Amino acid sequence: MEFFGEVSGVSLLAQGSEGGGAALNEIIGLSAAAAVITAILLWIGYLHRNHKISWLTKLADWSGRRFKRPPWVALPIAMFIASIICALFGFIWDVSLHIGNGRDDGALANPAHYFILIGLFGIFVAGCTAVVLPFDKPGPAAVRITDHWHAPVGGLVMAGCGLYALMGFPLDDIWHRIFGQDVTLWGPTHLMMIGGAGFSTLAALYLEHEGRKDRPADAAPDGIGLKFVQYLAFAGVLIGASVYQIEFDFGVPQFRQVFQPMLIGAAAALALVGARMFMGRGGAVIAALLAIGLRGLVALIVGPVLAAPINWFALYLGAAVLVELLALTPLIKRPVLFGLVAGLAIGTVGLWLESLWINAVYHYPWPTSIWPEALAMSVPVAVLTGACGAMVGMVLTGQRLPRRAISVGLVALTVLAIGGAAANGLRYNVPETATAAFTLTEAPSVDGQRFVTADVRFNPPDVVSDDPNWVSVLGWQGGLANERGQFVDHLEKVGPGHYVSTQPMPVSGTWKTLLRVHDGDTFTAVPIFLAGDPGIGAQEVPAEPQFTRPFVSEITILQRERSPDIPQSLWLIGCLVVLGCTLAMVAGITWGGGRINNSEPSGSEAELQPSAQS
């Protein structure tokens, strides 16, 4: 499950080994292909800017007539929609394949990688197309490049987000060559790719807004098709902010459970507050429904159709209804306050409503013991992201943002709140002397695979409280032909520190099967069976009829490919580099919103439709 670990366009280091970066021939091939495609696109841009070709202008004009937007908006937005959906499908399929199968034979051996590469490259190209297309100044917020060339803010931000995501590929290969495969969604360079794609949805909203402002005064009103695209944009923001939850969605979370409610609250507050303010009544609910439809369609294709592990996803309907109800009050006339209060409602009642769905269908429901710490993390994050969602809505409806110190301060506080909550969530404890004694009983084999049931006794018995987050067995990377390559069983407690399995577990073939214990800040595991992995020099951990093993940090089992002997200082430097790139992207998005808002004439909000008051 290295997700994107073996896709890379460039590497400055020597040829990688299995589990430590892509093969050199694949790097050369991908780099050459990227260079050729980039050269062709640059040449097309040069010819267009110098009026040596006309077909690009004609295509953009045709798109503009179809979508009732300026050509420099219509064509890039169409390209963006196709690209972001392509990237989303490839991303979820890739995660699913790695959960079921483990590592790839190479970067080009995984079909999902092609969708990811094409999708992220398409986002970057869509932004660049918006920058290259206009010959006249594209709206009052446009950025001057030369005396006769101005670029729309949304195009620049979109290209920047796409570039940020694409930078993750070569950095990811370098990362894996130094540190080994960090087989988790939340590897630093993986987050670059996810974040760049996710936040590019805000850039698309910026670009659409600039095009709407640049239309003639007598232009025809937007039709149902354009309305749908606008609703879809906010559904995209919701999905883009939700992809950080994918490990929980697939039932292979590698970090403490308190992260999940915080991530749900943040995504809901940012997207749904903005949707209600811009789209008017029903905007939040419709955005949530479209997000459910799109995520559901992708999950259906990846799971039942392609026979890969199935993922669930948050619905956000309870949060959307709360936002709609609050918008019926006078709070809607004070947007930032509306966002703060809506975030508070989402971070409390909204999360409780979402928990009803999660407890019904997810592999890991929320125990009652999670709530104190989950609320302490979720409430401040949801409140502040709600304020940011409100400011996005203000930009898109032409309402003047609060003065610079307040608006920038709110964004900075949001980043600090997320950082503080993440730092707390990353805190965990591994019992130093605790062990687990296993007695395995043979069960009927399935397709030649060995299955067993387990009787487990903890020593000391009180290593787990009466209401832990989970005591479960996870099996994964068993091959898609074997129960989709994934297995989860929540053990039944029969006495103090005494648990038994409720169904047979796989302990042969390529399976990696382990006992997982999560109880508050205790986050630990015991290997039951781990297939031998010659590619990384790992010996098989056999599932003997009886054995006693110590509890260890779960990361040492789930991330076997990760190099254990790399200095922490080097890891810290790598993380700081990625953090710097991420903060630059956030700053760029913030700058884009501020520049667009500063270009609005006083009182323009009354001229824009739809409005927050509708």
Image: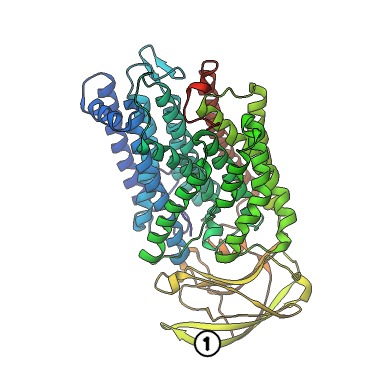
Q: Judge whether 148 appears above or below 87 on screen.
A: above
Point out residue 404 in the picture as x, y percentages from the top left corner.
63, 22
The answer to whether residue 105 of the structure is visible from this angle is: no
- Nearer to me, 208 or 448: 208
- Nearer to me, 551 or 456: 456
Which residue ends up furthest to the top in the rendered image? 147
Please rate how many residues cluster around mark 1, counting C-alpha atoms within 10 Å: few if below 14, some from 14 to 19, many from 20. Answer: some
* Residue corresponding to mark 1: 443
Residue at 55%, 53% in the rendered image? 245
Going by the numbered disc 1, the residue's amino acid type is: Ala
Q: Which quadrant holds residue 125? A: top left
Q: In this view, does 93 lie to the left or right of 248?
A: left
Residue at 55%, 34% in the rendered image? 277
The residue tagged with tag 1: helix, strand or loop? strand
Q: Which quadrant holds residue 468? A: bottom right
The coloring applied to the image is rainbow
The answer to whether residue 391 of the structure is visible from this angle is: yes
Q: In this view, does 491 lie to the left or right of 66?
A: right
Point out residue 588 in the picture as x, y percentages from the top left corner.
53, 29
Point out residue 361 in the picture as x, y percentages from the top left corner.
55, 65
- Nearer to me, 138 or 344: 344
Q: Judge whether 367 appears above or below 527 on screen.
A: above
Residue at 74%, 66% in the rendered image? 431
